[in-house]
């Protein structure tokens, strides 16, 4: 059985590449041994947002009196919250199944391995191996939870993100190791529904890839909620021999032991590139990533790689765009390489974080003379009316040429606001043009315009 394109992996890179390829007239198959939609849809982006929405609703109910609403005591039904999250994931996975069928993309169920000669070997659950050929093979095998030598996951007391989404009982206490997007989101979720959470980050600031002012603001918000935050602290060991866990951490003041029910390891991800035939085919890797050109072609003709297994941010929207660029290049269309300097990142804590481009420190380190504008949501009418005054919008411009170098937002619903900045930077829009573009009032989004105006000394509302 021959195909024009076989995609191994059905995550946001794989299924998008497959559907776009089918739209372009190719005969396409997707190899997937688990749920369609990959980790993001089934165990990452989507079900975690369902959990976080439940936490948000719970917090609104608990603070209903702040809005003049009288309600009874609210309780978090943990099994029901988990079930809703899984139902959302199942619904979305069925949606991917529908899209693949609609676009006549065949699903080859099993584990995919590439072989020389543009062959894909698929091993099904019964161990039966079947070989398929294709003119082009795209690897989109994604990542899994990374394990540290001193933080081995056992699935019971030391868990990864998958177990964190399906725990049968809500833990009374939890230590979250790692404060990137995954760690911070789970820390917020569990703290919000009543678990006592300690968040540990080995680097000096939590959410360490963000602008330092954003990191400090989120830390203050977490501490205000009752969460214990330890930055610049390393986990030395975890003793699981008792009923719970004893976590030994190294601080500036010496070792400290923290007791908890469960430890969540959120120290990053590892690529799924073992056992998929790379060495046999001769595909080159470096530091766990497949080496590709600007259009995701490996060094071996007919083999490509996209998503988390190639260099770049391990984000769903990045993988999707890489998949589209890859298949459109195969189809002979005129395409441009992806601009990795204009990729938005979002963290769905409360308050939310959204950013794109350079931080203030990165811009200074790069030698730019910069203009910085900042507009706090305490000065926003919509934020005040909504009871969501935490946070700010911060923008950074090159003082010489007016290039928009970066934007960093923290606050209510800012993940829905960052797209304006991404589009503006793509179109090389100037700060003056943003100021002159009429933004609706009252909205949270007008804070972007206000921050830009502040950078140029024209802000009226500060």
Image: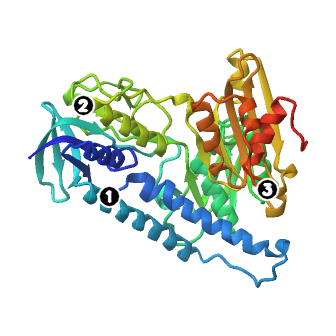
Res. 442 mark: 3
Name the N-terminal-most of marks 3 and 2.
Answer: 2
As helix, strand or loop, the secondary structure at mark 2 comes to: strand
Q: Is residue 158 above or below residue 320?
A: below
- Residue that mark 2 sits on: 303
Name the N-terminal-most of marks 3 and 1.
Answer: 1
Q: Is residue 195 visible?
A: yes
As helix, strand or loop, the secondary structure at mark 3 comes to: loop
The Cα–Cα distance between marks 3 and 2, rounded to whole angstroms, is: 51 Å
Do tag 3 and tag 2 residues touch (Cβ < 8 Å)?
Answer: no
The Cα–Cα distance between marks 1 and 2, rounded to whole angstroms, is: 25 Å
- Residue that mark 1 sits on: 99
Q: Residue at x 74, y 16 (%)?
A: 400
Q: Position of residue 252 (x, y in %)?
A: 76, 36
- Tell me: 122 left or right of 217: left
Q: Is residue 310 above or below residue 14?
A: above
Number of the front mark, 3 or 1: 3
Q: Position of residue 57 (x, y in %)?
A: 67, 70
Q: Position of residue 28 (x, y in %)?
A: 21, 46
Do tag 1 and tag 2 residues touch (Cβ < 8 Å)?
Answer: no
């Amino acid at each position: 059985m021959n195909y024009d394109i076989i995609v191994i992996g059905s995550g946001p890179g794989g299924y998008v590449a497959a559907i776009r390829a089918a739209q372009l007239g190719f005969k396409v198959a997707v190899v997937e041994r688990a749920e369609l939609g990959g980790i993001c849809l089934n165990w990452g982006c989507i079900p975690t947002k369902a959990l976080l929405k439940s936490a948000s609703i719970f917090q609104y109910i608990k603070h209903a009196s702040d809005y003049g609403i009288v309600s009874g005591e609210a309780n978090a039904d943990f099994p029901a919250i988990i079930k809703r999250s899984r139902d959302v994931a199942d619904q979305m996975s069925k949606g991917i199944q529908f899209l693949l069928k609609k676009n006549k993309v065949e699903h080859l169920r099993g584990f995919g391995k590439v072989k020389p000669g543009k062959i894909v070997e698929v091993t099904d659950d019964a161990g039966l191996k079947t070989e398929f050929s294709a003119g082009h093979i795209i690897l989109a095998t994604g990542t899994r939870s990374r394990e540290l030598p001193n933080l081995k996951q056992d699935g019971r007391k030391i868990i990864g993100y998958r177990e964190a989404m399906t725990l049968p009982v809500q833990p009374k206490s939890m230590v979250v190791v790692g404060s990137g997007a995954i760690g911070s989101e789970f820390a917020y979720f569990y703290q919000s529904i009543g678990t006592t959470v300690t968040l540990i980050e080995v680097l000096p600031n939590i959410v360490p890839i963000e602008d330092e002012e954003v990191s400090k603001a989120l830390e203050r918000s977490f501490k205000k909620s009752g969460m214990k935050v330890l930055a610049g602290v390393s986990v030395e060991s975890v003793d699981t021999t008792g009923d719970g866990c004893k976590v030994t951490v190294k601080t500036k003041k010496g070792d400290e032991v923290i007791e908890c029910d469960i430890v969540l390891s959120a120290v990053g991800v590892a690529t799924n590139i073992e056992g998929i035939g790379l060495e046999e085919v001769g595909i080159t890797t470096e530091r766990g990533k497949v080496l590709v050109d600007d259009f995701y072609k490996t060094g071996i003709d007919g083999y490509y790689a996209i998503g988390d297994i190639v260099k770049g941010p391990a984000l769903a929207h990045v993988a999707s765009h890489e998949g589209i660029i890859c298949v459109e290049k195969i189809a002979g269309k005129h395409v441009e390489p992806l601009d990795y300097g204009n990729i938005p990142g979002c963290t769905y804590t409360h308050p939310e974080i959204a950013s794109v481009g350079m931080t203030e420190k990165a811009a200074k380190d790069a030698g730019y003379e910069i203009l910085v504008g900042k507009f706090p949501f305490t000065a926003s009418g919509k934020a005040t009316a909504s009871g969501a005054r935490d946070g700010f919008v911060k923008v950074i411009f090159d003082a010489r040429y007016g290039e928009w170098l970066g934007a960093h937002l923290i606050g209510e619903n800012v993940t829905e606001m960052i797209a304006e900045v991404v589009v503006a930077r793509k179109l090389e829009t100037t700060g003056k043009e943003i100021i002159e573009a009429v933004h609706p009032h009252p909205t949270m989004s007008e804070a972007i315009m206000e921050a830009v105006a502040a950078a140029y000394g024209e802000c009226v509302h500060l």
